[in-house]
Image (spheres, grey):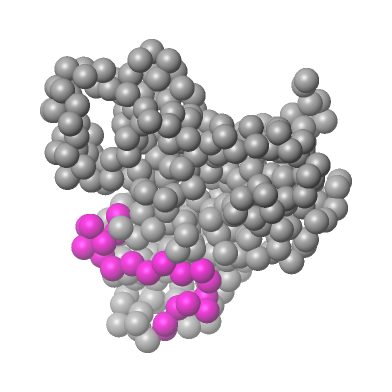
Amino acid sequence: MNSLRQLTGVEMAASSSKRLLIVNPRGFCAGVERAIEVVDRLLETNGSPLFVRKEIVHNKAVVEDFRSRGVIFVDELDEVPDGGMVVFSAHGIAPAVRQDATNRHLRAIDATCPLVTKVHNEVVRNVEENRHMLLIGHAGHDEVLGTMGEAPGRITLITSVEDVAGLDFPSDAELALTTQTTLSVDETREIVTALRERYPKLVEPRKSDICYATQNRQDAVKVLLAEGIGHLLVVGSQSSSNSRRLCEVAENLGVSATLIDGPEDIVPDNLTSLATIGLTAGASAPEHLVQAVVEYLSKEGWLAEELVTLQEDVRFSLPPEILGNKQD
């Protein structure tokens, strides 16, 4: 839109207006794009009602849009009629849920993010190799529930350094580590360090389990902070773990932050004394909400400038059922 333009460093330095720095990358990650496209295509080909277990992604606007188009979000599969079609959300499911769908002859389409599937596979492999799993994550999060369901009785949730101190495994125990994908490297660092010190034989994933998009968006926020912003606005819903983490990144570095679903959540009087504010969006927040915020703030006198820290080109293929080549 016209209010959004990319400026050179000289132009940015010369600007005397109130500055709104909009960072890129922001918003939808490849896993979210994939999950949303799954539901979009099923609505086009099968119509409604279409059942989705849990929120397809953790964003209020996305969920409400799908609900208005005939999607029925359910907490458990017993709310889906026998033989009905159901989509599993991007956050992953426990094997018991998948088996329940099979037992009830549901037509299940799995929209789990491939990066979450990677974590599930790590759990299965390590348990098969007789290691007990340690999962760093947030209790009750959909992703955590699905991951822990891969190894009931063989996986322990770690939420803090204090949890590490409370573990009763011997120092030479065969343990393996995995992480909820939507955490931040900063918030897991102390926990990982404590685990390494206590358990020298700890097996860690060859590549970090933290999602590339989660990390990229957190790194981009740090670039915004280096530009001297006085406040950070994060477009995202309270249910979005990675969106809340973006606020925490700023706050941990001394800059206040507000999580907003859209322009209706902005209190202009709280920003009037600031020369520069930053704007980003969580990995489940659609771009049209970002642009709505930009338009609103532009009318309030903020000059919008885009700050690009890197270009993302990650894409995930759709499930075979969606592509029309389902394999038996």
Pinpoint residue 192: horizontal percent, then vertical percent.
23, 34
Which of the two residues, 40 or 164, is positioned nearer the viewer here?
A: 164
Q: Is residue 253 visible?
A: yes
Residue 160 figure quarter: top left
User: Could you tell me which quadrant the C terminus lies in?
Assistant: top right
* Residue in view at x 71 percent, y 33 percent: 103
* Residue in view at x 73 percent, y 50 percent: 80
Q: Is residue 308 visible?
A: no
Q: Is residue 190 left or right of residue 144?
A: left
The residue lying furthest to the bottom in this view is 269
Q: Is residue 261 magenta?
A: yes
Q: Is residue 54 above or below residue 97?
A: below
* Residue in view at x 37 percent, y 86 percent: 269
Q: Give the mark count.
A: 0
User: Could you tell me which quadrant the N terminus lies in?
Assistant: bottom right
Residue 228 figure quarter: bottom left
* Residue in view at x 31 percent, y 77 percent: 274
Pinpoint residue 248: horizontal percent, then vertical percent.
30, 58
**From which residue to which does the magenta span run?**
249-268
Q: Is residue 146 left or right of residue 224?
A: right
Pinpoint residue 188: horizontal percent, then vertical percent.
27, 41
Q: Is residue 125 magenta?
A: no
Q: Is residue 219 left or right of residue 144?
A: left
Pinpoint residue 252: horizontal percent, then vertical percent.
23, 57
Which of the two residues, 67 or 86, is positioned nearer the viewer here?
A: 86
The residue lying furthest to the top in this view is 129
Which of the two residues, 255 or 153, is positioned nearer the viewer here?
A: 153
